[in-house]
Image (tube, helix red, strand yellow):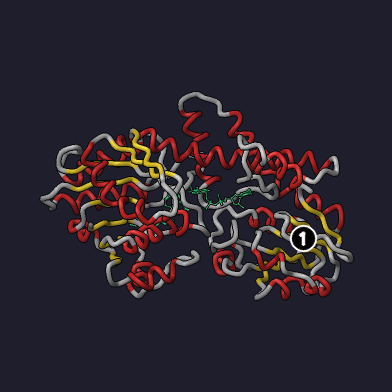
Amino acid sequence: MHVSVVGSGYIGTTIAAWFAELGHTVTNVDIDEDVVDAINAGEAPIHEPGLDELIGDHGGDTLVATTDYADVRDTDVTFLALPTPSEADGGIDLAAMKAGAESLGEAIAEKDDEHLVVVKSTVIPGTTEDVVTPIVEDAAGKTAGEAFHVAMNPEFLREGFALGDFRDPDKIVYGAESDAARDTLDRVYDPLVEAADGDPAIVETGIKEAEMIKYANNAFLATKISLINEIGNVCKEYGVDAYEVADAIALDHRIDEHFLRSGVGWGGSCFPKDMNAIRHAARDRDYDPVLLDAAVAVNDRQPERMLDLLGDHADVEGKRVAVLGLAFKPGTDDIRYTRAIPIIEGLQDRGADVVGYDPVATENMREKFPDIEYADSAADALADAHAAMVVTDWDEFAALNTEFDAMADPVVIDGRRVIERRDGLTYEGLTW
Ligand SMILES: NC(=O)c1ccc[n+]([C@@H]2O[C@H](COP(=O)([O-])OP(=O)(O)OC[C@H]3O[C@@H](n4cnc5c(N)ncnc54)[C@H](O)[C@@H]3O)[C@@H](O)[C@H]2O)c1
Ligand SMILES: O=c1ccn([C@@H]2O[C@H](COP(=O)(O)OP(=O)(O)O[C@H]3O[C@H](CO)[C@@H](O)[C@H](O)[C@H]3O)[C@@H](O)[C@H]2O)c(=O)[nH]1
């Protein structure tokens, strides 16, 4: 099958590479020429474990990137994997979706065969049918349900585990109103269902339901983390180890072990923006989402609690403080809404000289904070530091040992439970 993917970011590149690996011919459209050149040269434009190999195998061959939307005409189906970032009021900014829908419509205006337009991006219920479809119709001069079909197919992969998550999903959601759309999605996903280790459920549902399933999924997970963070904060006040508590409650199959790691909270390109969007959408219909608001409030407070713990042990004004971990989670160079941002800002407010270290996210963070120091290794960041704030649970931090001996004051505030308590270290865990 010939598949096109519009947008070559974290999602678009991953799914384009996987579709090629599954045997489809893939056209990947992006407006960024550097991204297009990288893919055609066989290089991944983002850091994602295993993606370099996959793009290396298919980039410039059965996976071809282009800035020219006209190339989608040769394809049977187009996945729109465009950004839907937060606006200032929390609603989603649909500028890229609208621009992409228009360019796609103009391209398929000159196509004779039927086409399937699939919204892959995370969008508020109603967006696919009320915003994207009319734009494609106008630009194509064609009617949805006749010359082209529409579907919504949300994506649930996690950054850092993107390739494994995409190949072996718990579920694949087809939001569609026509058999033609569902049949085309089947032809796209059949090779994946065959290759998957597990037995992914195919959820056939309406378009609005598919849009909402994505938000419900993320809202549930983000709220689950905020709940364990709230419990963890109470645990800390009573000298109780929140991780022992979490391990025990996880044995109840109704709770389960996943997303129960308390600490400095959730960041990333999805949970913060999706929580903002769904709360904004609720308010738009005069519903007050009190629990979702509370989950965000707990999350916003965790970095401040970490800075307060630091304040219990050190006055950092004019002192060097190491921030270990800049990415929002291990395995990615993505710094969108990383907890490292409020931690660095809080340290700067307290007059500290911040030195940041991350195995892969330094260059992205340098654009956000050009004036702080960046170290080439955790050891270099720790040398002569008066305190260290552990923000990301990279494995390499767990292996740190004698490196702490070079600190001016061995104060470690751990936001992710990666460092072992040990003699000689003034160690504080955020919730343990
Ligand atoms: N990042 C994730 O792990 C993840 C997971 C599930 C769902 N999603 C959703 O997928 C969508 C995309 O997210 P992302 O993280 O991949 O975004 P991203 O910002 O990483 O990438 C978006 C890409 O689109 C390109 N682009 C922008 N406007 C364009 C246009 N008009 N035409 C062609 N290309 C254009 C940009 O150059 C960029 O390469 C969002 O709705 C997001 O919520 C993301
Ligand atoms: O027990 C946990 C698990 C995660 N986190 C934090 O939560 C954030 C998000 O982590 P994760 O969900 O692993 O990464 P994402 O790549 O943001 O993936 C989420 O967001 C994606 C985009 O919508 C969805 O596709 C995924 O299903 C959903 O897990 C990170 O800051 C983690 O550090 C915790 O604090 N404790």
- Name the residue located 81 percent from the left edge and 66 percent from the top edge: 319
Q: Is residue 239 visible?
A: yes
What x and y, as percent, mark residue 124? 41, 37
Q: Of all residues shown, which one is farthest toward the top?
A: 286
- Name the residue located 66 percent from the left edge and 59 percent from the top edge: 393
What x and y, as percent, mark residue 75? 21, 56
What x and y, as percent, mark residue 290? 60, 28
In the displayed structure, 17 sits above or below 240; it is below
Looking at the picture, which amino acid does disc 1 mark?
Gly
- Name the residue located 50 percent from the left edge and 53 percent from the top edge: 158
Crowding at dot 1, Cα within 10 Å, few <14 / some 14-19 / many 20+, comes out as: some
Q: Is residue 23 left or right of residue 397?
A: left
Q: Is residue 236 left or right of residue 392?
A: right
Quadrant for ligand 1 reads: bottom left
**Nearer to the camera, 35 or 155:** 155
Query: Where on the picture, by quarter, is residue 8?
Result: bottom left
**Element carrying mark 1:** loop
Q: According to the image, label 1 marks what residue? A: 351
In the displayed structure, 336 sits above or below 51; it is above
